[in-house]
């Protein structure tokens, strides 16, 4: 059975002065599969190695099964690790390599052979057991290393990019096997990767890190649908979310509009709490986030869709669909540096996000019907067509050519807004609704 793992404000500063992990708090239930996801150098391995006992903890607390473990030697942690480059014993057969952790514990030969066969069956390498590592392919060696790690049924499994040296197809196949093997042992697992698709496919939950700071932790669909900030939004999902500059205008006697630069979207009149909340962010510089599937080019609009005119810049054929690159007169936005979830919990979030949060309390309270403040007038639209590209998926893009002007529909239910610091302000951060 797996252990619980608790990180309480864990930090690591290397002797060089480099702060690799900053103030991370997380709790893993027994048997949970958590993925640490982030770009190279964001502190994933450092954090994993602290859990393993291979790296000292600068500050904060690590608990295994609720017992303090900061100073517990690695050998006493009942933890198995699998790395990107597997160190198999070159002179031993696959069977001997897998059996190694058991042999060291003086089990009888028959029990060892049975355990090795069971693990090898699960990993599909039964017929390879008599080969040495040199006689195995990369993927097969990886399976042997997995077998060696799971055979003694550790209560914690730590994996550091175990598939990154394999080709794409093998990676997809092996990750299914990893899940099956790990679930079978019941071990609590922390899995490090920089590959968002792998993270989304494997994790019960995914913790996204940037520069040593935890950005968000949640189930894969939560990260995708309700990213805490523009960094998470753009790190998760391919093609990447479209991020463009924009602003919201809310005239007291007219419909709210969302300006994307040269064009604008008129929002529906019906006021949900979320919709009212948009008045708080009116006139502020915003980043508009639209995932590729929030945009389409064909058909009649639903009540939640709004039209734009798009100019095709590029069509990327992908077989079952095409990726259509278009411009709508908006300016592409970079992902801003963002505050961490901890900062936010400690009240250090961006001023706009704080305003949004306090407004939500007000709206939900007795002041819900207070008159809203008048809005500033909309500024004139820029006369130059912006260069920001939006990418969408299209089934029937065969007729599209660069330079074509086509109607584009934007699904407002999939609209995301981020403030200038990149924090998501719409759908609003607590119990979000949509249109
Ligand atoms: P990741 O696994 O996300 O690629 P790491 O945890 O390996 O990131 O590294 C996080 C940061 O800490 C990087 O900037 C890296 O250069 C730095 N770092 C890693 N190990 C050491 C070390 N032993 N001494 C100093 N800096 C280190």
Image (cartoon, rainbow, N blue to C red):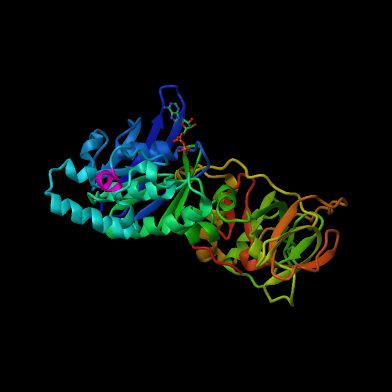
Vertical comparison of 368 with 234: above or below: below
Vertical comparison of 64 with 309: above or below: above
Residue 306 lies in the magenta-colored region: no
Residue 364: percent from left, percent from top: 51, 64
Residue 292: percent from left, percent from top: 65, 61
Work out whether residue 107 or residue 376 is closer to the camera in this orientation and state it: 107
Residue 305: percent from left, percent from top: 70, 71
Work out whether residue 325 or residue 171 is closer to the camera in this orientation and state it: 171
Residue 96 lies in the magenta-colored region: yes
In the rendered image, the residue lying farthest to the right is 383
Give the image quarter of residue 7.
top left
Work out whether residue 71 or residue 261 is closer to the camera in this orientation and state it: 71
Query: Is 203 positioned to the left or the right of 226 in the image?
Result: left
Query: Is 165 positioned to the left or the right of 140 in the image?
Result: right
Q: Residue at x 23, y 47 (%)?
A: 99
In the rendered image, the residue lying farthest to the top is 16
Quadrant where the N terminus lies?
Answer: bottom left
Residue 108: percent from left, percent from top: 11, 49
Work out whether residue 182 or residue 292 is closer to the camera in this orientation and state it: 182
Residue 219 is at least partly visible in this image? no
Which stretch did the figure color magenta? 93-98
Quadrant where the C terminus lies?
Answer: bottom right
Residue 35 is at least partly visible in this image? yes
């Amino acid at each position: 059975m797996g252990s619980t793992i608790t990180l309480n404000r864990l930090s690591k500063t290397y002797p060089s002065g480099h702060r690799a992990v900053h103030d991370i708090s997380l709790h893993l239930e027994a048997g949970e599969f958590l993925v640490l996801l982030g770009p190279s150098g964001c502190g994933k391995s450092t954090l994993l190695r602290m859990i393993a006992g291979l790296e000292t903890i600068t500050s904060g607390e690590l608990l295994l099964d609720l017992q303090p473990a900061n100073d517990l030697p690695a050998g006493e942690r009942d933890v198995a690790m699998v790395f990107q480059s597997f160190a198999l014993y070159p002179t031993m057969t696959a069977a001997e390599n897998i059996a190694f952790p058991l042999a060291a514990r003086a089990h009888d030969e028959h029990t060892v052979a049975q355990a090795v066969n069971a693990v090898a069956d699960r990993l599909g390498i039964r017929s390879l057991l008599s080969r040495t590592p040199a006689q195995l392919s990369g993927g097969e060696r990886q399976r042997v290393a997995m077998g060696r790690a799971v055979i003694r049924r550790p209560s914690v499994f730590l994996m550091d990019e175990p598939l990154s040296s394999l080709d794409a197809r093998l990676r997809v196949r092996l990750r299914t096997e990893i899940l099956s093997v790990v679930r079978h042992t019941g071990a609590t697992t922390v899995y490090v990767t920089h590959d968002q698709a792998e993270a989304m496919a494997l994790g019960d939950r995914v913790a996204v890190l940037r520069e040593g700071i935890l950005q968000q932790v949640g189930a894969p669909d939560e990260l995708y649908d309700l990213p805490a900030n523009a960094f998470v939004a753009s790190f998760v999902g391919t093609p990447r979310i479209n991020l463009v500059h924009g602003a919201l205008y809310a005239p007291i006697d007219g419909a709210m509009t969302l300006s994307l630069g040269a064009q604008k979207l008129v929002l529906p009149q019906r006021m949900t709490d979320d919709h009212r909340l948009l008045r708080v962010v009116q006139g502020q510089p915003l980043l508009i986030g639209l995932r590729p599937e929030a945009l389409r080019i064909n058909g009649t609009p639903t009540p939640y869709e709004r039209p734009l005119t798009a100019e095709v810049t590029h069509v990327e054929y992908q077989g079952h669909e095409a990726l259509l690159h278009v411009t709508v007169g908006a300016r592409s936005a970079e992902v801003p540096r963002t505050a961490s979830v901890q900062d936010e919990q400690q009240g250090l979030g961006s001023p706009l996000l704080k305003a949004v949060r306090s407004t939500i309390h007000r709206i939900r309270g007795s002041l819900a019907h207070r008159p809203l403040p008048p809005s500033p007038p909309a500024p004139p639209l820029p006369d130059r067509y912006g260069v920001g590209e939006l990418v969408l998926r299209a089934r029937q893009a065969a007729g599209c050519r660069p330079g074509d002007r086509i109607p584009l529909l934007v699904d407002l239910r999939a609209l995301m807004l981020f403030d200038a610091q990149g924090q998501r302000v719409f759908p609003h951060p607590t119990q979000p609704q949509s249109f």
